[in-house]
């Protein structure tokens, strides 16, 4: 039986008051996020229940004593540990269910269909040896993709290049606009995520065998003016992989959570991969074409951590330039929903595991291209 309430004037300590305030603020933030449709129903319910339990435990600590007594546990810490583990298992389950809904085999079906269709449209093209392929992964970026392509072409690059847009299951005119602007387009009939789209872009570049492949975002945040600097570093300094770092400039502004998260994972990757970069999650990077196979990744969603660790472990010579970003005018970040932050951390662990213990292999398709497969 629950005992009588504690005398609040005597028993509420600063720590308990602090926990109550923090819980109330977080509950308020979660409610607001739900109203703004920035979190799903399941995540909202679980988080509300968790933080309400924290608030109630701080308000009436004797509840934990009763739970300890009824369950036969040794102390309150075990109750809190079990509660935390339940939340972690929930997040892991959600991620596993998501991965099952679009399995690896389904990714291969989508990619094979897209590559096969692209191959049919490029069979009769007479394209000389390219020095550069610029790969742009895009989903529902019809408002920006045309301008990004125009900016690249306005540079009047002094070497042969082509632009390859991977239209990742867009429901707008992204693919059509890119094609009208003169870019090659590979169409996924289902969204595969940034990792899956980038992987398709690398595979698509095999048709052209360029010297260098550069990836750039479709939302306009990456300024194409840094492309010549990336190419120059690879060619003149014998660099294999170049990162365009946002954090090498003092002008880059982002949320505190993203800044702390990026710095944490960048430092972790630097230690695990024995490399030295300042921005592991940037999507603006250039790589020597012949080195793509050595960094070919398994992850289909977020892949930057796995990519960087593989680069370091396989001995690629890595360089970095400072690149200012442009603020996003349209669209939403991949972290628009709060739970994406939690899922990203789970994905990060999976990426590290993949980089150390799972090696991608290549199977030949139609004697002309290689599609990524995973050793089970």
Image (cartoon, helix red, strand yellow):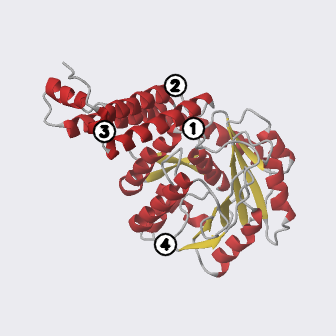
Q: Which of 150 and 12 is in front in this view?
A: 12
Instruction: Tell me the residue that label 2 is attached to.
Output: 41
Quadrant of residue 215 within the rendered picture: bottom right
Instruction: Tell me the residue that label 4 is attached to.
Output: 276
Instruction: Tell me the residue that label 1 is attached to.
Output: 337
The residue located at (79%, 59%) in the rendering is 127
Distance Cα–Cα, label 2 vs label 3: 33 Å
Compare marks 2 and 4 and give the one earlier in the sequence.
2
Compare marks 1 and 3 and give the one earlier in the sequence.
3
Compare marks 1 and 4 and give the one earlier in the sequence.
4
The residue located at (35%, 34%) in the rendering is 54
Q: State the SS at label 2.
A: helix
The residue located at (44%, 50%) in the rendering is 348
Distance Cα–Cα, label 1 vs label 4: 31 Å
Q: In the rendered view, would you say 106 is above or below 305?
A: above
Q: State the SS at label 3.
A: loop
In the displayed orientation, state which residue is furthest to the front.
9
Give the crowd class for mark 4: few <14, some 14-19, many >=20 residues within 10 Å. Answer: some
User: Percent position (x, y) of residue 277?
Assistant: 52, 69
Distance Cα–Cα, label 3 vs label 4: 48 Å
């Amino acid at each position: 039986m629950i005992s009588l309430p504690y005398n609040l004037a005597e028993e509420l300590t600063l720590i308990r008051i602090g926990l109550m305030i923090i819980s109330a603020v977080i509950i308020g933030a979660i409610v607001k996020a739900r109203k703004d449709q920035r979190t799903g129903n399941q995540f909202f319910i679980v988080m509300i229940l968790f933080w309400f339990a924290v608030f109630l435990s701080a308000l009436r600590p004797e509840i934990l004593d009763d739970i300890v007594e009824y369950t036969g546990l040794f102390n309150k810490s075990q109750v809190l540990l079990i509660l935390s583990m339940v939340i972690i298992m929930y997040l892991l389950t959600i991620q596993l269910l998501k991965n099952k809904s679009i399995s690896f085999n389904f990714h291969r079906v989508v990619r094979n269909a897209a590559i096969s269709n692209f191959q049919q449209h490029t069979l009769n093209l007479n394209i000389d040896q390219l020095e550069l392929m610029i790969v742009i992964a895009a989903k529902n970026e019809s408002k920006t993709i045309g301008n990004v392509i125009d900016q690249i072409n306005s540079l009047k690059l002094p070497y042969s290049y082509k632009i390859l847009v991977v239209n990742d299951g867009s429901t707008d005119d992204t693919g059509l606009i890119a094609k009208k602007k003169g870019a090659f387009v590979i169409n996924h009939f289902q969204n595969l995520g940034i990792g899956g789209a980038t992987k398709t872009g690398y595979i698509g570049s095999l048709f052209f065998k360029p010297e260098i492949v550069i990836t750039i975002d479709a939302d306009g945040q990456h300024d194409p003016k840094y492309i010549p600097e990336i190419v120059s570093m690879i060619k003149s300094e014998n660099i294999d992989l170049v990162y365009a770092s946002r954090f090498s400039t003092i002008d880059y502004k982002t949320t505190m959570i993203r800044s702390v998260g990026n710095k944490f994972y960048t430092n972790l990757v630097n230690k695990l991969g024995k490399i030295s970069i300042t921005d592991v999650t940037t999507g603006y990077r250039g790589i020597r074409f012949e080195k793509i196979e050595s960094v070919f990744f398994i992850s289909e969603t977020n892949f930057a951590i796995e990519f960087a660790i593989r680069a370091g472990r396989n001995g690629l010579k890595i360089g970095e330039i400072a690149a200012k970003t442009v603020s996003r005018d349209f669209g939403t970040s991949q972290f628009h929903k709060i739970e994406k932050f939690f899922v990203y951390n789970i994905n990060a662990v999976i990426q590290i595991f993949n980089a150390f213990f799972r090696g991608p292999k290549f199977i030949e398709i139609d004697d002309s291209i290689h599609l990524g497969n995973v050793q089970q």
